Amino acid sequence: MSPPAAPASRPADTQTDTPRQAERRANILQIARESFLEDGYAATSMSSIAAKLGGSKGTLYNYYASKEELFAAVMTAHCAVARARFESLDVKSGPLEERLRRFGEAYLDVVLDEEFLAVHRLVTGESGRFPEIGATFYEAAGKRGKSWLAVVFAGEMEAGVIRGDDPDKAARLFLGLCRSDVHTRRAWNVIPKPSREEIAVLADEAAAFFMAAYRAL
């Protein structure tokens, strides 16, 4: 049976929510996130989420027109806190290598955390059958973070601090240096989350390697 069509009054975005709607939406996202993580994407349905919410499917569809849309909202909300943390970092003052160290520490602290890894494992496990959830997670997490860092590198290239190149490629390479093999080993539960001191060393190594490759001559 096809899902009911979303009513015309369904909020277009969270900015139109009343306080009561905002509270309801936050509750929906929390229940949906728990359901996706516990049961997987395939086994989670709008009906099961509605049952956990204690309401009707019609009420749920007032907020999200499909499971895909709801999953995208869960991913966006999940990544918003981390994104806000990155955007609050001071990346405009001080030597670039030092700024990269700070960014690298914040980045590793997030991607090596168990809460983030739980979502990463969900997406990795389900995206073979449902490639749309991989694309959704990439848009909410990886792409936005890389694009933001690329803007920083573009400015440094223009200022002559680092050699000219594709800023997107530079951002991709730096994030790869930060993750090294630690992210994979952490995701597979080979190691516990590194200490703050160990994360600082990893970020320092990534920043040093990047500057050695990109520093303007």
Image (cartoon, helix red, strand yellow):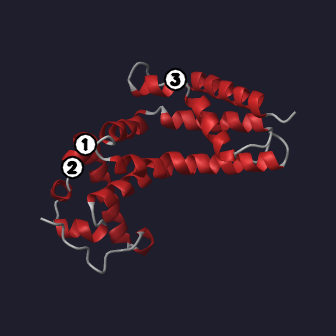
Quadrant containing the N terminus is: bottom left
Compared with 156, 193 (above or below) is above
Q: Can residue 143 be seen?
A: yes
Give 131 or 66, whichever is nearer the viewer: 131
Residue beneath the point at 64% across and 29% down:
203
Compared with 35, 46 (above or below) is below
- The reply to whether callout 1 and callout 2 are in contact (CB within 8 Å) is yes
Q: Amino acid at mark 2?
A: Thr
Q: Relative to residue 40, is residue 186 drawn left or right?
A: right
Give 207 or 133, whichever is nearer the viewer: 133
Q: Which residue is mark 3?
A: 181
Question: Which circle's residue, 3 or 1, is located before the other in the chain?
Answer: 1
**Residue 213 percent coordinates (x, y):** 75, 29
Q: Which residue is mark 1?
A: 40
Q: Amino acid at mark 1?
A: Gly
Question: Which circle's residue, 2 or 3, is located before the other in the chain?
Answer: 2
**Residue 138 percent coordinates (x, y):** 46, 47
**Residue 112 percent coordinates (x, y):** 48, 31
Mark pair 3, 1: CA separation: 26 Å
Q: Which residue is mark 2?
A: 44
Q: Quadrant of residue 117?
A: top left
**Residue 137 percent coordinates (x, y):** 42, 48
- Per the image, label 3 sits on a secondary structure element best described as loop
